[in-house]
Image (cartoon, coloured by chain):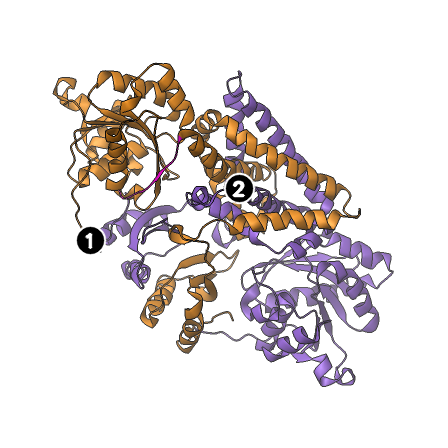
Chain colours: A purple, B orange
Amino acid sequence: MTETPTPAATAGPVLVIGAGLLGASIGLGLRHLGVEVWLRDSSPTAEAVAQDIGAGRSCRAAGEGRVPEPALVVVATPPDVTAQTVVEALRAHPGAVVVDIASVKESVLEEVRAQGADLTRYVGTHPMAGREKSGPVAARGELFTSMPWVVCDSGRSSPAALAAAKNLAVDLGATVTFMDAREHDATVALISHLPQVMSSLLASRLQDTPPHHLSLAGQGLRDTTRIAASDPNLWVQILSANAAPVVASLHGVRQDLDRLIATLEAPRAPGARLDIAQLIAEGNAGQARIPGKHGGAPRAFATLTVLVGDVPGQLARLLTEIGEIGVNLEDLRLEHSPGQPVGLAEVSVLPNRRKELVEALQERGWKVVQ
Amino acid sequence: MTETPTPAATAGPVLVIGAGLLGASIGLGLRHLGVEVWLRDSSPTAEAVAQDIGAGRSCRAAGEGRVPEPALVVVATPPDVTAQTVVEALRAHPGAVVVDIASVKESVLEEVRAQGADLTRYVGTHPMAGREKSGPVAARGELFTSMPWVVCDSGRSSPAALAAAKNLAVDLGATVTFMDAREHDATVALISHLPQVMSSLLASRLQDTPPHHLSLAGQGLRDTTRIAASDPNLWVQILSANAAPVVASLHGVRQDLDRLIATLEAPRAPGARLDIAQLIAEGNAGQARIPGKHGGAPRAFATLTVLVGDVPGQLARLLTEIGEIGVNLEDLRLEHSPGQPVGLAEVSVLPNRRKELVEALQERGWKVVQ
């Protein structure tokens, strides 16, 4: 891995308030670029751990009197205390730009505005990155690499404040998108909060399923329920703070669901088959609109499936040989197998390279699906 | 790849009726074992293509007079004509065992029974394998390797008929599970049909989302909507044939959805937060019950995330080095990155091997997440 050091656009000192997964990851990323970072957390332990992993200096450990006046404050607290923390930071640091990173934006902005804080120095942002783990121990400086980071003008944010927010995101390797708070919240309601709710609703049905039934589960069930493992405490805050746009989407779901239930209760009625086909076709249409890898237009890669043994190095050998053949791997899925130590690797490549790759792999003795 | 040839337990000749993806894959798999296979399809083209790829001999091409009396008939037609085809096969071949492979079982059995066919020679089965493609061109003999294959006693199936159905599944490398038709249908309603419906309902909401909103989509949305790309024509047949158990699950979903909508319409009401937390926690509980790889108990693998460049061979090099280090890869996920040619590989390993692997990879210069 080669590294290209670029000078940070973010001017320090930066004060990060909230040293959880995201705050500590921001600290780590900025420290890698040489930016001065200070850390504050309501939990002394989190603050100390974040300092220990190199995410910045603990304000407590240094003594509050030694903490320099920040140029930028990053509020990385849980969503339910974000607005209050932003307001306090704007008042405590009258020369600083204050950004927050909560995953809902309009309710925070409304509360900051309602409290009469200085909106010219405030910018709401949302780095769309996360992990299934939490806390500073899980932090990593590369968390934001290549991920979207939404920046929301408060309506009165100064150009300097917007530039500071943008620089922070760019320094951490993220891809910046500008939209206002309301548009942001409507967007995440649909692309993040609704999938979470649907996954939880689905997984919830499995609570009483006998184990020998669940052992028949395939990749479809695994994929659709993966995010149902998310943290209830975090999602309570997100869903209650963004309730209105989420409910709007859920009403649409309920309408479709009611129609489907009515149809399936009389599956031989005239038009029933058409109704079902329409629901599935509408799902096809929506799914096809999700962009492919690297934010490009949805792209149909060609896939081939290769049988691999479940022993160390088998998959590595496959990918090495694909590399030797000179074809770029666009995506890779492993299919899990109940009860047997054999797996299937589904390899995605550009359509015009598929034939060549299949032939080359077969020559090398791999079992490739036609 | 080493191959261990085992003699087929299935006695031929086998007549496969329906030369689509599944029928042609069964033919291919049996031909690899040297079993005599004959193919029949209402589409002359499908029948000819299936013969061309080596899935067996076309009855049309040979001339019907030359087709030998089959010992086993596999009905692999679309679900909506399966029962009728089974009945006709039982009558046309009074010495043969007849199995079908439709993904719903009770409605087929009821219709076969209602027509007074010989249930002692009939066994309903369901190989839980498939591809997002269809037709004989997509067929592959390994389609069933390590996948579950459910075998349903008709209630009057003879021991010989049950053995023939089991032998077929075992010959094709599948893992056999016995359950009756009603239990099968209730199971797939929950683990296969409900996920399909939820994924379609979710993806359907994306039909009018502006592209620049969808470009913020993360892995969560991609995973939860992947199966929404499925074939409407097939799913109309599946959902209408298994309507009752699917509706039962959907009523449960609607109850939870109604509760959530009511809660989110008054997100500051007493108890609202608890209600939301409960929904997410119930999803946690259901998700945690899905067994892990190889049908074992759900197993917590340790994960580590490694930064990989999007160039040919980079991921292969990573997996090769993991192999050299001597740690078995239990699972692998690639995280996609919008707009930038960098990816993250999430590697799952046994928890007691994680530390060693992280250290060894870092020594070799990989950027590993702590």
Front tag of 2 and 1: 1
Q: Is residue B75 visible?
A: no
Q: In this view, does A166 lie to the left or right of A300?
A: right
Percent x, y for residue B232?
Answer: 46, 30
Can residue B279 be spotted in the picture?
A: yes
Looking at the rendered structure, whether the residues under marks 2 and 1 are on a common chain is answered as yes
Name the image quarter holding residue B8. Answer: top left
The residue where tag 2 is placed is: A289
10 Å neighbourhood of mark 2: few (<14), some, or many (≥20)? some
Q: Which residue is drawn at 33% across and 14% down?
A: B116
Give the percent coordinates (x, y) of residue B110: 40, 20
Front one among B318 and B213: B318
* Residue count near mark 1 (Cα–Cα under 10 Å), binned few <14, some 14–19, many ≥20: few
The residue type indicated by label 2 comes to Arg
Letter of the chain that mark 1 sits on in the rendering: A
Nearer to the camera, A227 or A157: A227
Left or right position of B335 against B41: right
Q: Which percent across, then down, holds residue A187? A: 65, 47
Circle 1: residue type: Glu
Dot 1 corresponds to which residue?
A363
The N terminus of chain B: image quadrant = bottom left
* C-alpha distance separating marks 2 and 1: 37 Å
Q: What element carries label 1?
A: helix
B178 versus A76 height, above or below:
above
Magenta segment includes A293: no
Q: Residue at x 71, y 56 (%)?
A: A152
Q: What stretch is highlighted in magenta?
A: B172-180
Is residue B54 toward the left or the right of residue B358 in the image?
left
